Amino acid sequence: MAKPPKQNSPITEHLAYLLAQANREINRQLELRLSKEGVPVEQWRILKVLSDGNGHSMGELADAVLLNHPTLTKMIDRMVSDTLVYRVQDPNDRRKVLMFISDRGKVLCKKLNSLAVDQEEHILESYGDKSTSELKRLLESLIDSSN
Amino acid sequence: MAKPPKQNSPITEHLAYLLAQANREINRQLELRLSKEGVPVEQWRILKVLSDGNGHSMGELADAVLLNHPTLTKMIDRMVSDTLVYRVQDPNDRRKVLMFISDRGKVLCKKLNSLAVDQEEHILESYGDKSTSELKRLLESLIDSSN
DNA sequence: CTTCAATTCTTGAATATTCAATATTTTCAA
DNA sequence: TTGAAAATATTGAATATTCAAGAATTGAAG
């Protein structure tokens, strides 16, 4: 018996495409809210990571906020100008720079957090509690299995 | 009774972050494979959409491949130089440009498809059949509910 | 018909990102 | 202890993306 003709799946069925599409849409919505404070999503991520009050090296930060090093350096330059964060040389390893959040940064971060929470709540409403937590679980496990 | 203190969820728990992280990782893997043919992911998407043989307008394409118009125009310029695609003015609406895939584009697209299929199979292996289809389902539904 | 608004695509300037190279410091082997 | 290799962050040039404006065409109201 002949093989069935291998139908060429449209791009919309690829996992990579669905992820890109969903990411784009959710990110667009988040951007929209954060733009109320004139802050790009990446800066919110940076502030959020630093808001534990500890110093974080640039490399650590770059991993955490999904930016590569040079891009992060330049974004941090802007944030330092805006006095949202500041640099301190790591006394234990002087190759490293430790980043800290400023008081002004903390205030801004709180505002941004509540804008972001707004969005999460909006998603919960339209998409459902159960779907959301299931989706999160699956995404975490996908990320795990990719390492 | 006092409310429990609202603990500030770390960024890694936000849906927007998980999506960005998963997208980044899967995209990185796909890029790696497609780089064997020296083609960026977006160009593969373009070729794949055009490989139905029909003409697609720039606006339609931009939506389909998740690029904004000027970025797409410039990428298409490159692909025209490489004779992978070509432009035809839409006879029914001369504001529009219809994009078509060339024979050379078709040949390349086939090679790229098999590289992409490799990746999907790799994901299926490490992540599982069931999780994958469930994740796809949830992503589709999230995208739906966002419109 | 004519005109004005809307649609579609492209262009050029401003901005952002990336790659490769550099500077500094640490690590570790000889 | 010295010197080479690795790790960390930044810089500058090359590249890519985005925003705002422009050109061409269509649609539609008066």
Image (tube, coloured by chain):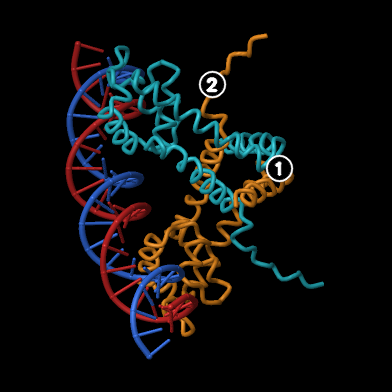
Chain colours: A cyan, B orange, C blue, D red
Residue A30, relative to residue A98: is it above or below? below
Assign the N terminus of chain B to one quadrant of the image: top right
Residue B8: mark in rendering: 2
Separation (CA) of disc 1 from disc 2: 29 Å
In the image, taking residue A32 as reference, residue A18 lies left or right, namely: right
- Give the crowd class for mark 1: few <14, some 14-19, many >=20 residues within 10 Å: some
Q: Residue furthest right?
A: A1
Please tell me how crowded label 2 is: few (under 14), some (14-19), or many (20+) other residues with Cα within 10 Å.
few
Q: Residue furthest top?
A: B1
Check disc 2 and give the amino acid type.
Asn
* First along the sequence among labels 1 and 2: 2
Viewer-side residue, A79 vs D11: A79
Chain on which label 2 sits:
B
Is residue B89 at least partly visible in the picture? no
**Which SS class for mark 2?**
loop
- In the picture of the structure, the residue carrying the numbered disc 1 is B131
Q: In terms of depth relative to the viewer, which is nearer, B120 or D4?
A: B120
Which picture quadrant has residue C22? top left
Residue A126 in the image, given as x and y percentages of width and height: 65, 43
- B103 in relation to B19, above or below: below
Residue A95: image quadrant is top left
Dot 1 lies on which element?
helix
Q: Answer whether residue A56 is visible to the viewer in this image.
A: yes
Where does residue D7 sit, x and y in percent of width and height?
36, 26
